[in-house]
Amino acid sequence: MPNARRIAVGSDSRHPIPDAIAGWLEAGGFAVIRCGAVDATDTSWPEAAEQVARLVAQGAVEAGVLCCWTGTGVSIAANKVPGVRAALCKDADTAAAARRWNGANVLALALSDATADDAQAIVESFLGTTGIDPEEAANIRWITAMERRYSGAGGEAGSRES
């Protein structure tokens, strides 16, 4: 399956939804890299988030899907990895908008209120949306410049690059 789209799926706890997401994606022809509790046993949410985010940032996968009880923790942790833009999305429209308008490359989902059907629709919308709206390209460049400024990877904190 060398030409399959590669997606990382991670969660901090064993739960039917992240397992189902990985299964749907595999059934749909994606090459899935399972992280955190989707691969093994319960792990901390920062650890699961870092595993997925690192794969996305390195270009080893096209995108990532992360789950924790609220989705907030994994989105915060994933966004600490340079090159990652994780978005917590609770519906399919927001997931598509996060990809198109914000260049999101990691989807965060809340297990506390998601149904399997909702999660599938959100993931399908996220992965089915490609390309950044040209009108938003400057904003994505701004975010990338901010990331460089504040990570110490070039530029002075507080200077503007775009």
Image: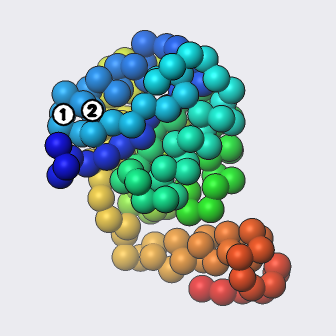
- Identify the image quadrant of residue 126: top left
Type of amino acid under label 2:
Leu
Q: Give the x, y percent position of residue 139.
A: 54, 74
Mark 1: which secondary structure? loop
Tell me the quarter of the image containing the N terminus.
Answer: top left
Residue ID at (39%, 37%): 33
Is residue 105 at all visible to an observer of this figure? no
Q: Residue furthest right?
A: 157
- Identify the image quadrant of residue 8: top left
- Identify the image quadrant of residue 45: top right
Residue ID at (56%, 63%): 83
Bin the neighbour count of mark 2 within 10 Å (Cα to Cα): few under 14, some 14-19, many 20 and up.
some
Is residue 53 at all visible to an observer of this figure? yes
Type of amino acid under label 1:
Gly
Q: Give the x, y percent position of residue 158.
A: 82, 81
Mark 2: which secondary structure? helix
Residue ID at (43%, 13%): 16
Residue ID at (52%, 14%): 14
Q: Give the x, y percent position of residue 75.
A: 62, 42
Q: Give the x, y percent position of residue 124.
A: 29, 38
The disc label shown at residue 28, or none: 1
Q: Which residue is mark 2?
A: 25
The disc label shown at residue 89, or none: none
Bin the neighbour count of mark 1 within 10 Å (Cα to Cα): few under 14, some 14-19, many 20 and up.
few
Tell me the quarter of the image containing the C terminus.
Answer: bottom right
Circles 2 and 1: CB atoms closer than 8 Å: yes
39 lies above or below 100: above
55 lies above or below 68: below
Residue 10 appears left or right of 7? right
97 lies above or below 158: above
